[in-house]
Image (cartoon, rainbow, N blue to C red):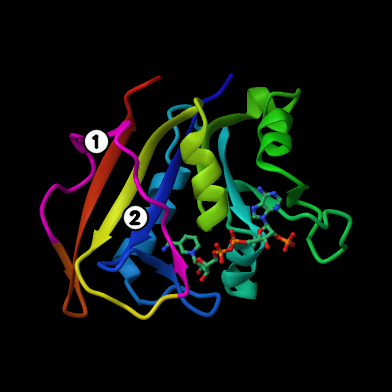
Amino acid sequence: MKKFSLIVAVCENGGIGYKGDLPWKLKQELKYFSRTTKKLNNPTKRNAIIMGRKTYFGVPETKRPLPERLNIVLTRDPSSNIYPNDVVVCKSLQEALNKLEDIPLVDEIENVWIVGGTAVYKEAMQSTRCHRIYLTEIQTAFECDAFFPEITNDFKLVENDADIPQDVQEENGIKYRYKIYEKVSN
Ligand SMILES: NC(=O)c1ccc[n+]([C@@H]2O[C@H](COP(=O)([O-])OP(=O)(O)OC[C@H]3O[C@@H](n4cnc5c(N)ncnc54)[C@H](OP(=O)(O)O)[C@@H]3O)[C@@H](O)[C@H]2O)c1
């Protein structure tokens, strides 16, 4: 069974979103999200990103589905016809993960990324299939209405991958750092 990782940017007060959007504008951080979730060892494959309905619709209309990745959206109303044909719509995280084990997706998909929001992150972090959390720690507080769940102590900070900067980044006067937590109980 495939493992998955989470990727999230969290501000100083634990927030991740405000009014359906990101509370900050960090262009390079968005590029990091894009680069990381697209990264492949086998260029004939692609990665999957799993997200809640609000996260999907938080992406500007012209930019969704997010390109070069299989977009899987979770909703309790999967029969709705508001999604384009190339989006996979599932009614639970388990259903999404099961689908990724089926032919042809099991051969086509290299990495699985959980990209939010709050409840999806929480359920994913509790799973034994959760490998890592790629967390951008934003060192400023923003007004938020969506928050990242508590990181339990079965996650430990590990060294960044070779292609991820260790040092503090800065954009528009906002400082942030890329961190990786790994689930140790696996
Ligand atoms: N900073 C970051 O890295 C980051 C990442 C992601 C999102 N965000 C921000 O966070 C906010 C959105 O997050 P959110 O927590 O409010 O909402 P969300 O998780 O994106 O979407 C919530 C909706 O997803 C569906 N859903 C969630 N869990 C489900 C499950 N287990 N099974 C079936 N359906 C499920 C439900 O849809 P239905 O109501 O249709 O049933 C639910 O109402 C936005 O502001 C976004 O910009 C930030």
Ligand 1's quadrant: bottom right
Q: Magenta stretch?
A: 145-168
- The C terminus lies in quadrant: top left
**Nearest the camera: 4 or 106?**
4
Residue 46 on image: x %, y %: 57, 37
Residue 109 on image: x %, y %: 60, 31
Membership of 162 in magenta stretch:
yes
Asked if residue 24 can be seen in this view, the reply is yes
Q: Secondary structure at mark 1?
A: loop
Is the C-beta of the residue carrying label 1 under 8 Å from the nearest atom of ligand 1?
no
**Residue depicted at x 34% and y 40%:** 152
Would you place residue 17 above or below residue 71 in this image?
A: below
Determine the image quadrant of residue 123.
top right
Mark 2 vs mark 1: which is more N-terminal? 2
Per the image, the residue denoted by label 2 is 32
Image-based side of 7 in relation to 19, left or right: left
Report the amino acid beneath label 1: Asp
Image-based side of 99 in relation to 14, left or right: right
Asked if residue 44 can be seen in this view, the reply is no
Per the image, the residue denoted by label 1 is 161
- Contact? badges 2 and 1 (CB < 8 Å): no
- The N terminus lies in quadrant: top right
**Residue depicted at x 37% and y 81%:** 143
